[in-house]
Amino acid sequence: NVHSVINVYNWLVAGGKSVFLQDADTPIMHTDQLVEVIRYLKETFPSIERVTSYARSKTIGRKTPEELKQLHEAGLTRLHIGMETGDDELLAYVNKGVTAEEHIKAGKLAKQAGFELSLYVMPGLGGSALWEQHAINTARVLSEINPDFIRMRPLVPMDGTPILEAYQTGEFELTSPHERLLEIRLM
């Protein structure tokens, strides 16, 4: 594909220093296979300094410390995890599939293995009713993990989600931009 060749050329001209593995949860691969992929990338493109991936807390929590160290030593340097919230009630409501404690365990495992860690938080996820507990519990989890980066991605209800349905029926009240700022300040 011509577009792929042009993209690789542009990446190399720009220095070819950073690679982002495009998947929602690349570390779900068998560790030895992912190590092979990372090593191949770094051998093929010696200019690479950083390899980054999305990951899920559940997946990182299932890896052994040794497996995580292998991935880091192979060259995977940064993980991005969509934490969304540190509040168990909200994690269950949005079917995140993890608890606050599982987020903490995964975050600590990632940090101990040497990864830079970027966590995504969703201001507004608690709506008007639960914004305060969302902020307080999320702050507690973030403090326990101590990530390198915290990225705010405000809630935008999407088609087919329970939150959009609850919003449309009046059961869930969205926070205003000002209220989200107050929530982030409290956090």
Image: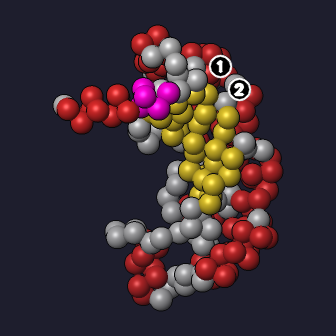
Name the residue: 58% across, 23% down: 49
Q: Secondary structure at mark 2?
A: loop
- Give, as a three-letter code, the residue at label 2: Gly
Name the residue: 46% across, 82% down: 167
Given contact means CB atoms under 8 Å apart, are the residues at marks 1 and 2 in contact?
yes
x%, y% of residue 149? 69, 47
Q: Nearer the viewer, residue 187 or 59?
A: 187
**In this orientation, does residue 40 appear?**
no
Image height of 157 relative to 44, above or below: below
Name the residue: 52% across, 51% down: 97
Q: Which residues are magenta?
A: 11-15
Q: Secondary structure at mark 1?
A: helix
Q: Horizontal placement of 86 versus 29: left or right? A: right
- Please identify the quadrant where the N terminus is shown: top left
Image height of 80 relative to 111, above or below: below
Image height of 115 relative to 93, above or below: above
The crowding category of the residue bearing disc 2, from other C-alpha atoms within 10 Å (few below 14, some 14 to 19, many at least 20), is some
Name, please, the residue furthest toward the top.
Answer: 43
x%, y% of residue 34? 46, 20
The residue at which mark 1 appears reads as 69
The residue at which mark 2 appears reads as 114
The crowding category of the residue bearing disc 1, from other C-alpha atoms within 10 Å (few below 14, some 14 to 19, many at least 20), is some
Name, please, the residue furthest toward the bottom.
Answer: 170
x%, y% of residue 17? 53, 27
Q: Nearer the viewer, residue 128 or 150?
A: 150
**In this orientation, does residue 167 appear?**
yes
